[in-house]
Image: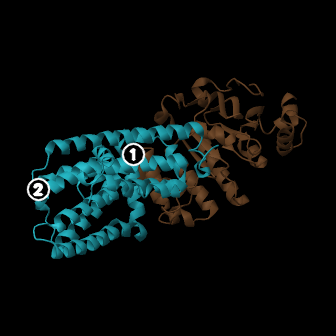
Chain colours: A brown, B cyan
Amino acid sequence: MSATAGIVEPAAAPAERVLAVAGLSKVYGDVKAVDAVSFDVGRSEIVGLVGPNGAGKSTIINTVLGVLEPSAGSVHIDGVSVAAERAKALQRTNFAAVYAPLPGNLTVYENLRIFGLLYRVRDLRARIDALLGQFELGRFRNVKCGVLSSGEQTRVCIAKALINRPRLLLLDEPTASLDPATARDIRARIRDFAAQGEAGILWTSHNMYEVQEVCDRVLFLSKGRILLEGDPKTLPQQHAKATLEELFVAVAREPLTVGAG
Amino acid sequence: MSLVRTFAILLRQAYLIRGSWSRVFPLFAWVAVDMVLWGFLTRYLDSITAPGLHFAVSLLGAVLLWDFLVRVMQGVTMAFFEDVWSRNFLNVFSTPLTIAEYLGGLVLSSIATSAVGLVVMFAVAATVFGLSFSVYGLTIVPSLLILFACGIALGIVSSAIVLRNGPSAEWFIWPLPAMISPFAGVFYPIATLPAWMQYVAKLLPPAYVFEGMRAVVTGRASAVGALSWGGGLAVVYVLLACWFFARTYRRAVRTGLLARYSAESVS
């Protein structure tokens, strides 16, 4: 797979891809927020999308979610075009983001029920009960989300993100602002979900330790372009860096130099 | 179109109202106050004017019907504002929910909340001030339907304005009914207005409703043709309002405003 910007050949066979992004660009006036980005996410694969603030990570996630129209390029979720069949494509995905908490004036159960209905989840009551158990939220069932701690709210957001058993799960900094123990717990639960083999995960994070621990593959994004791509465990050595964090800093500071190397 | 997803929007509103007195209270309190205020005023006017003018029937009835339109509009906008206030657009619009399903949910929410206001107004006007709706005959049914459709159209347009201009545009939409009411002839015949205002009134479905009501109260037959025209106009406005909202939504998706709504603009 190419490690530079532009069209990147998919690593997984087409039938195994749950997300295929091709030539994706988003332009705001003279600013290219995302510039001809191509990548894919395979089934049961966790792909990390990392880069400095403003690199275009959230822009990519928003275009995948259909809440932002790309200037060029295409997004297919489980083989369905977001542009052409938005509802069908979004039925196969879900997301959790630190900047998109669930309404704090509704209880945990109410939020999960409403989003379960929006995704038309079958046997919704049983599904909610299962998620409440899985994320240890049972005692907060009738508690308003707004009064939960950050960690508890994150667990509710991830429970909502899993309610429709998505083929593609988008996680935008899911462990930001969590204490290390809670973050580890969340990572373990998400890894368990990926290990079930039905879904792929696109994960953005600024925590390089987390990316190295969780992700099968990492994409380094800078100034709207993918500069590097590879196994987070071996990528630093390939670029003569001791750690992924060192590589991240180098990419953030001197993106073109590192990308060429 | 999925009725389940439309129901989800209605259910969300039901959950919010169920758990909040600050949402329940306005459903009936202000319309009840309006009925009491205008009820006593009409009672006073009836006592100092010549018999047969029937202020209770004409004026109080008009206030009731106009309040109904305003409540319908607010039913739509309040349900929409719940997403604005809780910054929920990203969560809601990243689901398979379509715009038609979303607007359908807002309309159902409005039907539920405005029905409460309508029942309270009918009850106060009838029991305290003796307003009998049999006076209006069957005209009351199409009149309520036309006002309902207008309230829906106004609510959807108002929601689109806030979607387009950000949460701060909220102040702009609350006075909209008050801006329309002088042209709609709620309290006086359209003929009272200057010519240019009468031209505007011809474009407003409520004007046909209130003219028809006055005709019935004064013993004349309600113009069925005019009421039908008003109904047709109301349907057109509902369709135009839905188109306007969908267009505004698509623009918000294209420009990135939806994803960064709290910024109010992307420029």
- Residue A226 position in % (x across, y down): 75, 32
- Residue at image x 40%, y 71%? B21
Q: Which mark is residue A18?
A: none
- Check disc 2 and report the residue beneath it: B137
Q: Name the foreground residue: A90 vs B114.
A: B114
Q: Is residue B32 above or below residue A242?
A: below
Packing grade of label 2 (10 A; few <14, some 14-19, many >=20) is few
Q: Which mark is residue B103?
A: 1
- Residue A3 position in % (x across, y down): 78, 28
- Residue A24 position in % (x across, y down): 65, 29
Specify which label sits upstream in the sequence, 1 or 2. 1
Res. B5 visible in picture: no
Q: Is residue B216 above or below residue B248?
A: below
Res. A133 visible in picture: yes
Mark 1 or 2: in front is: 2
- Residue at image x 31%, y 59%? B114
Amino acid, disc 1: Leu
Q: Name the foreground residue: B122 vs A166.
A: B122
SS for callout 1? helix
Q: Is residue B41 left or right of residue A202?
A: left
Q: Chain of mark 1?
A: B
Q: Is residue B250 left or right of residue B196?
A: right
- Residue A60 position in % (x across, y down): 65, 37
Amino acid, disc 2: Gly
